[in-house]
Structures are given as structure tokens and as C-alpha cells.
Image (tube, rainbow, N blue to C red):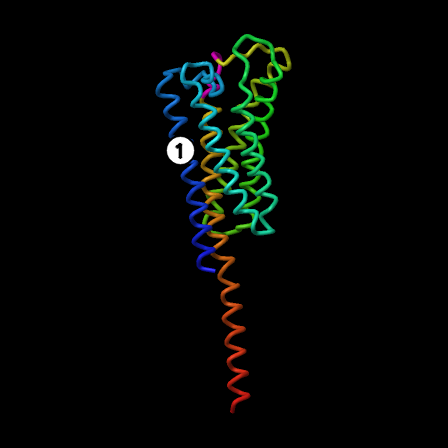
Amino acid sequence: MGSQAFTGSMVILGGHAAIGAGATTMLGLHVVTGLDPVHTVISEYAFEADGWLLPLSLTLFAAAATVIAAMLGRDAGNRGAALLVGTWGLCMLLIGAFPTDEPGLPLSMSGGIHRYAAFVAFLTMPVAGLIMARRLASGRYARAVRLLSLASLGVLVLVILPYVLRTFGMEVTNDDIPAGVTQRLVVGLEVAVLTLLGLVAGTTRRVAATPRRVAVTSRRVVATSRRMAGVS
């Protein structure tokens, strides 16, 4: 049992390492391109010379999400949230594999996949966080996970609002609004939720292992007592 707990801890550590590497890569992308982060959305960084850093970063986040989803899914009660986290990871891969359209061009198939995968990703992580916060109740990370998930949903409304306005014929461009800021806030909040869910997965595995160890010990004590009683 101890070796299983150690293996689980190492797997979670690997997931967190992937998050750190993905965040570092994303930060490096912003530094080397020098684009305006207030009005330029992250997807447009793919058109720069160092744009390959974007799919690399997203792939690292996807790997982390896959690891954490697998660890969460070992507890039957967490499988709904685990499925959503895994979906978020899949969407990260799709966002990286299908770049958005350059500004001014009509929506292509690649751009459509990119856009809707991003929307699904932006929605699934905070919902997963709220599900886990409810399961944790007053647990160690419950409050932080809940607050970050609610904040992510709140900022997501601001991300979607320009698309809604355009649907009604209002010409709103990224130069008119801080689209880059709101998008980065959502991404940052969701990566933070993913990181906390990794900690939750590690804690859940340790807590779940304790009752089993207690049960095994109790059975051994009972069996020993019976043998002693039989001898006497």
C-alpha cells in the first residue's frame, strides 16, 4: 500500500511538473514575441516566428490534465469531474492542433474547431472545480477551488460578450476591448484550478488508502485474538 501511495504521489508530481513547464513555455512565448497582451488574444501568437511554443505549451497542459483526471477517476465519486478535466485536456490538444484564423479572414474549419474547443475548455474546468468543491465540502482545498472556479466563470462571460455583440451586428474588435486581458485571466484561473485539483487527487488517494489500512489491521487483530482464544 505504501508503494502505491508513493507511486500516486510521483504521478501527481509529474502532472504538476507538466503544468509548470507549460506555464513557463507560455510565458516565454509572450516574452519573445513582444505582442500587446492587452488586446492580442493568445491564439494570435501562433502566427509569430516563435509561435510553435503555443502548441507546445498547450500539449504540456493537456498532459497534466490527463494525469490528474486519471488520478481523480480512481475514486468512483470523482469520475464526473475527472471526465471534465480529461475533456479540458483534449480541448487543449485541439486548440493547439487547429490554429485560429488570421484577423480579418472568414471563419475556416480549423478556426471553427479552435474556437469551439476553446469554449468547451473554458467551460469544463470551472464546472469540474465546482463539482469537486461540493464533494470536498469543507475540505482543505474546497474554498480555494470553489472561488477560483466561480471567478473563471465570471470572467468567461466577459470573454463571450464580444461574440454575442457581433451576433447582433455590433462591430466590436479586440482593439476596442481588453480581449487579451480577459482571455488570459480565464486561462490563468483554469490552470490554477487544475493545479489545485492535482493536490486534491493526491490528498484523496492518501485519505482513501487510510481506511483500507485500518480495515486490514483490524482483521489481523481479530484473527490474532481468535487464535489466542483458541489456544487458551
* Disc 1: which residue: 21
Mark 1: secondary structure: helix
Query: Which residue is at 52% across, 10% downward?
Result: 103
Q: Which residues are magenta?
A: 175-180
- Which one is in front, 230 or 161? 230
Report the side of 118 relative to 195 (left or right). right
- Which one is in front, 90 or 31? 90
Image location (x, y in percent) of residue 112: 61, 19
Badge 1 crowding class, 10 Å Cα cut-off, few under 14, some 14 to 19, many 20 or more, is some
Query: Which residue is at 51% across, 86% downward?
Result: 228
Image quadrant of residue 130? top right
Tag 1: amino acid: Ala
In the depicted structure, whether residue 6 falls above or below residue 12: below
Query: Which residue is at 50% across, 52% downward?
Result: 138
Image location (x, y in percent) of residue 208: 52, 57
- Which one is in front, 178 or 74? 74
In the depicted structure, whether residue 132 falls above or below residue 112: below
Characterize the magenta stretch by its predominant secondary structure.
Answer: loop
